[in-house]
């Protein structure tokens, strides 16, 4: 039984610093070249910087924080933590082993989301963000993610900031 492909739904993406200019064909039809591709919910770009994916996840986290803010007026820290872990942090951490937040600006973007999240709890609203320390759970929650981040930073040659 032959494998049938819908060529109209197929894309071609070249990864690397200098993407290739070649064209690929299937059944004498040229594949459409694309700068990004979404696979298993992760948006890959040609430079493997995952900027579109990170911005998408941050926007989704802000949407969910808005829903929490509108529907849960008086949150206890315990109830907020449950909502945050299951609704917001799950979006921020999805695929983190693939896109690994090793750049400083990415970590800062993720922390801004968490800073805004801590302001939803009335009982700790007056505290500084550093006193709440909700961000430690995102970057140091799994040893394997931390090791992969360091390995990726070493291979790419980027500086990595650890928080222990």
Image: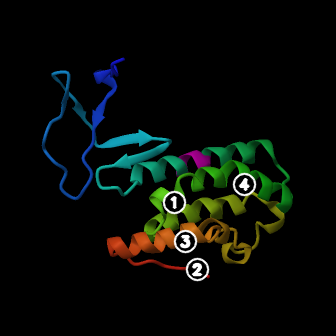
* Residue shown at the point (85%, 60%) measured from the top left: 78
Which residue does the numbered mark 4 point to in the structure image?
Answer: 84
Residues under numbered marks 4 and 2 in contact, where contact means CB atoms less than 8 Å apart: no
Of tags 2 and 1, which is closer to the observer? Answer: 1
State the residue lying farthest toward the bottom. Answer: 164
Which residue does the numbered mark 1 point to in the structure image?
Answer: 97
Say what secondary structure mark 2 lies in: loop
Which residue does the numbered mark 2 point to in the structure image?
Answer: 163
Inspect the magenta stretch and tell me whether residue 106 lies in it: no
Question: How many angstroms separate mark 2 from mark 1 (CA)?
Answer: 18 Å
Q: Quadrant of the rendered structure where residue 38 is? A: top left
Which residue does the numbered mark 3 point to in the structure image?
Answer: 146
Quadrant showing the C terminus: bottom right
142 w.r.t. 82: above or below: below
Callout count: 4
Q: Which residues are magenta?
A: 58-62
* Residue shown at the point (79%, 54%) measured from the top left: 82
Q: Residue 80: percent from the left, percent from the top?
A: 79, 56
Among numbered discs 4 and 3, the one appearing first in the sequence: 4
Q: How crowded is the residue under tag 4: few (<14 C-alpha within 10 Å), some, or many (20+)?
A: many
- Look at the magenta stretch and give its main secondary structure: helix
Say what secondary structure mark 1 lies in: helix
Q: How crowded is the residue under tag 1: few (<14 C-alpha within 10 Å), some, or many (20+)?
A: some
Question: How many angstroms separate mark 4 from mark 2 (CA)?
Answer: 21 Å
Of tags 1 and 4, which is closer to the observer? Answer: 1
Q: Residue 144: percent from the left, percent from the top?
A: 57, 68
């Amino acid at each position: 039984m032959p494998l049938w492909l819908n060529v109209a739904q197929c894309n071609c993406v070249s990864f690397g610093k200098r993407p290739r200019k070649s064209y690929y064909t299937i059944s004498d039809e040229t594949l459409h070249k694309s700068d990004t591709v979404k696979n298993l919910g992760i948006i890959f770009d040609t430079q493997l910087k995952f900027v579109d994916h990170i911005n998408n996840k941050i926007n989704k986290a802000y949407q969910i924080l808005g829903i929490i803010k509108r529907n849960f007026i008086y949150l206890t820290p315990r109830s907020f933590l449950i909502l945050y872990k299951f609704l917001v942090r799950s979006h921020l951490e999805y695929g983190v082993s693939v896109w690994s937040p090793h750049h400083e600006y990415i970590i800062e973007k993720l922390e801004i989301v968490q800073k805004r999240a801590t302001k939803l709890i009335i009982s700790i609203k007056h505290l500084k963000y550093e006193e709440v320390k909700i961000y430690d759970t995102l970057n140091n929650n799994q040893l394997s993610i931390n090791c992969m981040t360091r390995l990726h930073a070493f291979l790419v040659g980027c500086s990595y900031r650890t928080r222990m």
